[in-house]
Amino acid sequence: MEAKSKAGEWRNFERVLLPAVKDLHKIEVYELNEGYSALREVLTTDKWDPTSVTNEVKKSGLKGRGGAGFPTGLKWSFMPPVDPDVPRFLCCNGDESEPGTFKDRQLMEYNPHLVFEGMLIAAYAMSIKTAFLYIRGEFADWITLMESELERAYEKGYVGKDIMGSGFSCDIVIHKGAGAYICGEESSLMNSLEGKRAYPRIKPPFPAQKGVWGYPTTINNVESLACAPIIIRKGGEWYAGIGADKHPGPVLYGISGHVNRPGVYEYPTGMLITDLIYDVAGGIRGNKKLKALIPGGSSTPILRADMIEGVTMDADTLREAGSMMGTSGMLIMDEDTDIVSWLRRITHFYHHESCGQCTPCREGTGWIENIVTRIDEGEGNLRDLDLLLDLCSQMEGRTVCALADAAAWPVRYTIDRFRADFEAKCRPSLVPAGGILENA
Amino acid sequence: MTDFIKHPVVDLPERKLEPVISTEDLVFTGEEKSQIKTWISRYPTADGAIMRGLWLAQEKFGFLPPEVIKLVADEIGVPYANAYGVATFYTQYFKEQKGTFVLDVCTCFSCQLCGGYDMLHYLEDKLGVHKGETTADGAFTIQEAECLGACGSAPMLQVTNGPYVHNLTADKIDAMIDAMREGKMPEFASVTLPQDEDELGGNRRSDVTTVEPYGPCPVSETLS
C-alpha cells in the first residue's frame, strides 16, 4: 500500500490527548471538558465491568507508547485472577529518559488529570488498589505540579476510598526517581520503587506474575494510560479507526534536531515521515538537506535520507524500512552533521547509563565508547569498524535487560548505513588489498 | 596466609572518618520525621521510602555524606547498606559537596547537535572551571548531564535538580549567572506546544508567567 502525502490535511486533526483548552491542567477546567466522565461511566454504570474495560482497550488496538509497542489491552489481560489476600499493583512509567524523547513531560504538565483518570481506569480493569506513578527525578517541577493536582483529585473524591460511591477504592502514589536511565526498564523500575538499586531482573517471572514486592504488577507508559479514558469515552472502534490500521491512535510526536519548528505534536500514527519533517516541523533549518533521522529515540536504528521515501510512522512500515517506532521522539539531522561524533555521544550515554550488573554490557559499552572515540579523533584503523560490529554481536541478547541491545544497535546500524563516513575518519590502510600473505 | 590482612604489605591510604556534619546538626525535625512516616505508610515495606528520605536529606544538608545516609536509614528503619546502595546508584544524589548552584548542562545527542557543547564550553570559560568542578567561591558547579528530556528546546540546562532553562544562548547564560550571583533561582518556564501557538495564542497555562516557544536551534560549533 502506497502512503499518500497528507500535507496540510493534518491541520484539521482534532487533538484528544492535548486538546486546545486553556488551563486544562486545573481540575475545574478538566471537569468541564468531560474530565473524569469516563471513570464515572466505568464505575457507576452496569455497562462496564473489569473484563469489558479490558476488552474495549483490546478492541482499540492501542499499542504501548513507551518504546516496545506491546498491545496494552493484552498486557492487562495477563494479570492472574483476583485473590483477595494478594495485593496487586499498577505502575505508570514516567521515567522518560530515552534521548530524543520529551513527550510525557508535556502530557504531565498540560493534562495531568487525564493520566490519573487513565491510571484509575486501568486499576479498575485489573482490580488494583494501589497505583504508583514513577516520574524521573529530573522532572522536579512537574512532580510538584502532579502532586498538587493529585491532592485536588483526592479532595474531590476521584482518587482514594470508595470513588464516586461505587465501592471501588484506589490510591495513587507518586514516586520520585533520582536520575537513572535504566529505571525506564520495567523490572528495574520495580526495584527502584522497592527502594533498591535499580538493577533489572531476569524475566520470567514477568511482572504480571511477580512484580513489585513479588505481587502481580502491570507497568504502562504515561501516554498509553492517558489513552484509556479516551477509549472509554469515544469507544474502542473510534480509536482503532484513527491512523494506521495495525498501530492506531493519536500519538505525541516529539520532533527535535535541525528543524525549523521542533516540539511535541499530536497527530495520528501512520503519518508520512516526510510530511512530519517538511510540513509539520517546517522543514530543515537553513534549507539544508536531510542526512539522517532516528524515528523514536536513541535505540531505534538510524535511517538515511534515501530510506524514508513513502515510509510512515507506524510499527509495521518502519520495520520494513529497517527501523522501529520506539517512543516516536524523532531526531532530524541535516547534511552537515558529523555522524561519527554523534555516535560517539550515544556510546558515551550508554556507557554512563549501564547499571553494571551484566559484564557484556558494563564492559562492552565502555569498549565501544573507547573505539568510537578513537575513530572520531582520527586515530582509528579500518579494522576497528569490524571490531565494533563483533563487539556488538557479543553484547546483543546476552544480558538481563535490553540495554546492551539498545547500546549495540545504534553502533551496528550507523556503521552499516554510514560506513563511508566512518572510513573517511579512519587512518588509511597500509596493507594492500588482498592482505600481506598473498603478496609475499 | 591471612597475615597480610592484619599487616598489610602496602600502606593503606588514611581514611577520613570524621563526619562533615556535626552531631548537633545531624537530626531531623519533628515535621520532617512525620513526613517520612507518611511516605513509609504509602509503601508495602519501609524500603520504598528510602529514595524520598534521601531527597529530603539532600535538600536539608545539601549533599549526602555517609553520616547523613545513616541518619536516613535509621529514621526509616532499614540497614545502612541498603540506603548507601541506593544513594550511590543514582546520579542525582550528591555524594560530595557541590556549589550553591549546580548547573547540569545537557549534552546528550539532541543537545549536542544543537550546540550543547558550545554552551558547556561557554560556561566553563565564563566561570573558569571545568565540568565536574566547583568555583573557588563555592557558588557554581558545572556538570555534563545525560538526556534531561527537553530535546525540543535544546540546548538546555537544569539548575540544582530543579528548574530547567530552555533554549540557551550566551546572553541567556550571562543573565542567568548574574541573577544567581544575587541568589536568584531561575523561574519555572513552560514550553508551549507549536500547535498551541496556532490555536491558543501560545500560552496554555494562565498560572505561569514565563513562557517559551520551541524554536529552531542554533548551529553547533563543536560537537564534543
Image (cartoon, coloured by chain):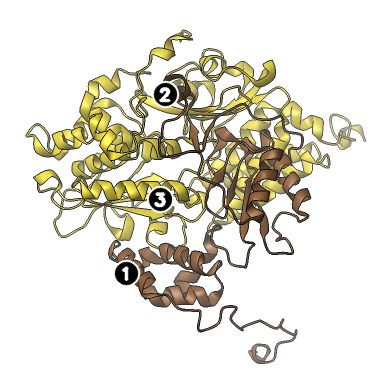
Chain colours: A yellow, B brown
Alpha carbons under labels 2 and 3: distance apart: 25 Å
Label 1 residue SS: helix
Which residue in the protein does label 2 denote?
B200
Q: Chain of mark 1?
A: B
Q: Is residue A270 above or below residue B133?
A: above
Q: How many marks?
A: 3
Identify the amino acid type marked 2.
Leu
Q: Is residue A48 above or below residue A171?
A: above
Residue toward you, A37 or B6: A37
Q: Which mark, by number, is residue A292?
A: none
Q: Is residue A224 above or below residue A215?
A: above
Q: Is residue B14 left or right of residue A5?
A: right
Residue toward you, A339 or B56: B56
Residue at the (32%, 39%) spot, across then down: A26
Q: Earlier in the sequence, mark 2 or mark 1?
A: 1
Label 2 residue SS: loop
Residue A90 visible, this orientation: no
Alpha carbons under labels 1 and 3: distance apart: 19 Å
Residue at the (65%, 32%) spot, across then down: A414
Looking at the rendering, which quadrant does residue B99 occupy?
Answer: bottom right
Residue toward you, A387 or B109: B109
Q: Which mark, by number, is residue B37?
A: 1
Alpha carbons under labels 2 and 1: distance apart: 43 Å
Which residue in the protein does label 3 denote?
A144
Q: Which image quarter holds the N terminus of chain B?
A: bottom right
